[in-house]
Amino acid sequence: MTKGAVITEEHFIDCFADGLQADGREVWCEASAVFYDGAHLYFANDKDMPGVDASVFYIPYDGKKIYPDKPVYFSQPALKSSHKYEDFALTPDRKHVFLTTGFDRIKSDSHEWDGYNSLLYWSSDKLPNSFSPKNTKLAQNENFSLTLRKALSKALRSSQFPEGMPYFKVEGLAATDTKLYFGIREEGKKFDDFAYKVKLVSVPYRFALDSLILSEDFQVISDINIATMHPGLPPNLALSSIEYDRARKVFWLLTSSEGENQANSAYLWWATEADLKANKMNIVNDRLTKLPLTFTNKAEDLALVAKNRLFIIHDDDRSKPKVGGVIRKPHQAAYSIVEFMTP
């Protein structure tokens, strides 16, 4: 589908004021999600903001120039009470926005971590001025999306965990006209005993009177082994984003690796739904070198901002990479612009 791509721009966005502190500690921007509405880039941070601000904000963007010094934050209670955001998804008709957390922690004897389990959605018709996020609720009287977490856990069950996967992390979310796709980056026994994954769970959805209705048919459609497909790539590559391209009817995916003993790196892929069901992805090569297009940051999410242009946001946690010779500061997040050619 693509004849290759090039990284045409790399820089930082300023997520908030330099030196912002909470409880006597400097706040870090760990931007983990992005989507584009044609006039603004919307971001989510996987770390909480101090005060009344939620970890969701937008910056004006005209498709060519970003205005990184003008972030505007939201403060809706539903956004403020959920934690560790990982990915946005926009429906193909662009009428609804989804925002998922990681679903990577829960306490059976307490509600303390319930807010880490949220699939939020809202109508896009009044963005950015006003919107009312709702939590996906598959059962009555729940405040977050805990029953959805149970459904995902059940879909991920294995011979080792026949009752459901006890630990997993959602890092990707995509929407077609009829299905949602949850991208799983980690799964296993617990947060420090897991395997890195490129796994996708799909579920049919629809809207009724602006309320989200999910089917009970959760299915694992992909469990991709990158080491087998591309043995020359770094170890422990795992899914960090999936987005649907409605014009091309393909999915764009990001995989990244991280760890104390290796540098951050990431790669861009594309796949049809048939490819994914066959456990295949197609790596995007650098148009100049013909080698896999490589990011030296931990690419976390992407948005299609023009016909052949992707905006990619990086979450380098608390490391301080250089971009264009400039060292990242805690209030900043790196981004890349990718231009690609198609036949």
Image: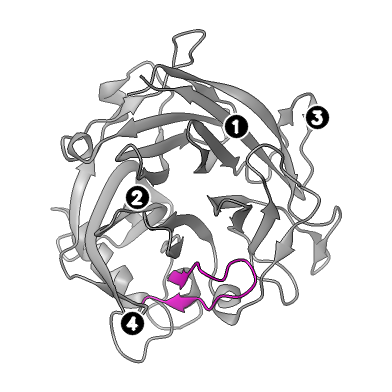
The range drawn in magenta is 120-136
Q: Can residue 148 be found in the magenta stretch?
A: no
Disc 1 residue type (three-letter): Ile
Point out residue 325 in the picture as x, y percentages from the top left corner.
79, 24
What's the amino acid at mark 2? Gly
User: Which percent across, then down, holds residue 259?
Assistant: 53, 36
Vertical order, 73 against 111 (above or below): above
Q: Which residue is mark 3?
A: 326
Residue ID for mark 2: 183
How would you classify the magenta stretch by its main secondary structure? loop
**For marks 1 and 2 on the same chain, the one whose residue lies earlier in the sequence:** 2
- Report which residue position mark 4 lands on: 209
Between the C-alphas of marks 3 and 4, the distance is: 49 Å
User: In the rendered image, which residue does mark 1 sit on?
Assistant: 337
Relative to 45, 68 lies left or right: right
- Mark 1 and 2 residues: CB-CB less than 8 Å, in contact? no
Q: Element under label 4?
A: loop
Q: Nearer the viewer, residue 63 or 276?
A: 63
Residue type at mark 3 is Val
The residue drawn where x is 22% and y is 61% is: 203
Q: Residue furthest bottom?
A: 141
Judged left or right of residue 122, residue 260 is right
Q: CA distance from mark 2 to mark 4?
A: 27 Å
Q: Does residue 259 show up?
A: no
Name the residue: 38% across, 30% down. Answer: 269
User: Image point 37% across, 50% down: which residue?
Assistant: 193
Residue 117: numbered disc: none
Comparing 75 with 223, the one in front is: 75
Which image quadrant is residue 191 in? Answer: bottom left
